[in-house]
Amino acid sequence: MKLDILVFAAHPDDAELACSGTIAAHIAAGYKCGIVDLTKGEMGTRGTPQLRMEEADKSSKILSIHVRENLGFADIKFLNDWEHQVKVIKMIRKYRPEIVLANAIKDRHPDHAKGAELVQQAFFKSGLNKIHTNINGVAQESYRPKNLYHYIQNDYIEPSFIVDISDYWDKKIDSIKAFDSQFILRENDEQETFISAPGFLDFIDARAKEFGHRIGVKYGEGFTMSTTPGVKDMFSLL
Ligand SMILES: [Zn+2]
């Protein structure tokens, strides 16, 4: 299946936290969108890999995404090396998206910047026809998507552009709450973490309002890009 947007995320829930409003907005506009999680988030303090896979599945249904895969890389330990790049290249060539979204270029969790660099390398190398890959023995054609954008997650980064997600705010929150092992703290539960602490969802709300305010809408999600955005029609900007 060819996708319009392919989202890579170091952990199941990164996409929901940082860009699920954008995913929902583009799916509503008729685009096909998929998520490839790099790891199962098995080093997370709370929940189990199995539970997080079930939660990812629940969230995928809420967002109506077309495909979700997990590459099973080792959480925390995966490297931005050739072996891992080839696995990402295979996903890009399999789904041939126009736009790739990847983790934030710097963030609190070290896997995020590492995931960002890994996808950046694979994004370029996927277009080189002397790099041969195959899936189940079937050779893949080289393919380089048009654009790579990085979603902004925990640490504040000045965005290159902001997407209006006001109409998809409830869907974003529902998709985040699908990961209730991570975000909902129950009595006598496992230990509280940074993301299960009361106030974390307030932070998500505040960040989206801040980005929304910057472009004159209620809620927004911010992205960075390493090139300069170009438009054919100046009126297409908000
Ligand atoms: Zn993460």
Image (cartoon, helix red, strand yellow):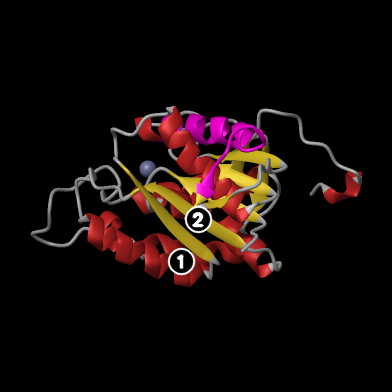
Residue at figure coordinates x 64%, y 32% from the top left: 130
Quadrant containing the N terminus is bottom right
In this rendering, the answer to whether 96 lies above or below 87 is below
Judge by depth and name the residue closer to the eye, 28 or 79. Answer: 79
Horizontally, is 152 left or right of 141 in the view?
left
**In this rendering, does residue 30 appear at all?**
yes
Do the residues under discs 1 and 2 have CB atoms within 8 angstroms? yes
User: Quick one: label 1, few (<14), some, or many (20+) residues within 10 Å?
Assistant: many
In this rendering, the answer to whether 186 lies above or below 217 is below
User: Which of the two discs, 1 and 2, labels the residue nearer the N terminus?
Assistant: 2
Q: Main secondary structure of the magenta part?
A: helix
Residue 36: x and y, percent?
47, 52
Q: Secondary structure at mark 1?
A: helix
- The amino acid beneath tag 2 is Ile
Kindly report the distance in space between the C-alpha atoms of the residues bearing marks 1 and 2. 9 Å
In the picture of the structure, the residue carrying the numbered disc 2 is 35
Which range is magenta?
A: 112-134
Give ligand 1's quarter of the image.
Answer: top left
In the picture of the structure, the residue carrying the numbered disc 1 is 60
The answer to if 100 sits in the magenta stretch is no
- The amino acid beneath tag 1 is Ser
Horizontally, is 152 left or right of 12 in the view?
right
